[in-house]
Amino acid sequence: MSLTEKDKAAVKALWAKVSKAVDTVGGEALGRMLLVYPQTKTYFSHWPDLNPGSEPVMVHGKLILGGVTEAVSKIDNLSGGLLELSELHAFKLRVDPSNFKILAQSLMVVIATMFPKDFTPETHVAFDKFLAAVALGLSEKYR
Amino acid sequence: MVKWTELERSTVKAIWEKIDIDEIGSQIWARVLIVYPWTERYFGSFGDLFTITAILKNDKVAAHGRMVLKALDKAVNNMDNMKRTYADLSRLHFQKLEVDPDSFRLLADCITITIACKFKSALSPQSQAIWQKFISAVVDAMSSQYR
């Protein structure tokens, strides 16, 4: 399911808007993920507070959003362009790759609540494909 | 059997009451077919599904979406009995319609996103968590007769 030129354009157009809310979108997505899919909390037991809006959640969410922004800039080469991030997730964090899909859904729900007119079905399919490709890129170094 | 707190019951009902089946049903079904186009395999009789525009204008898509949402009403009103409530529908989807049960999860995700577009920040993280528990229980119930 590789990204067409149309998909890439749709992702870039959406991200131009979403990245303006860099201080909140990532944190919101992470906060929702931890609450809606509690099994994901197993990766963050070292944080004092896992509730939506808490400091560690918002700080880490901004970091994650930065990672997605980097992926958008490397949209023409996601399998090769995310190797460092892939090594981090594979060897240090050891996040089960099934969780990338869960975070993707959480991010899309936040985007839907904040940019409902922009998150049309057409944009949704392009962005879903993009996040799936990012997940594949992040999984590259796993085995 | 899934256990529900009073808060969970009232949250699910509050979300459901605000959903206009006629408006949202057609949007949800169009979204599923557009975002997960392989689901079109079940709708050969629906006519033109070849472009996004065609899907968005297709009356059969809209009607089917409304029908599915009406069936979701049964879950809202039978939260303590979902497996029994959906046993026949589950069997129908398995034996006669031959629908891959993974499709139920895809539909659930699209329903959540459509609701998120409609409710915006009113779909708080807490509400979303409760909704996800509810819709996952529906997906489980619909998958329960696949054996």
Image: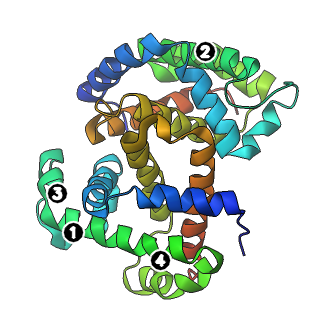
Q: Earlier in the sequence, mark 3 or mark 1?
A: 3
Q: Quadrant of residue B131?
A: bottom right
Front disc: 3 or 1? 1
Q: Which residue is mark 1?
A: B63
> Residue A27's spot in the image, x, y percent?
61, 22
Callout 3–callout 2 Cβ contact below 8 Å: no
Q: Which residue is mark 2?
A: A62
Front disc: 3 or 2? 2
Q: CA distance from mark 3 to mark 2?
A: 39 Å
Q: Which residue is mark 3?
A: B49
Q: Which disc is residue B74 wearing? A: 4
Q: Disc 3 residue type?
A: Leu
Q: Secondary structure at mark 4?
A: helix
| Image mark 2: chain | A
Q: Is residue A48 left or right of residue B39?
A: right
Q: Which residue corresponds to the image point at 55% horizontal and 59% vertical from the top-left? A: B12
Q: Is residue B83 left or right of residue B116?
A: right
Q: Which disc is residue B31 wearing? A: none
Q: Are marks 4 and 2 on the same chain?
A: no
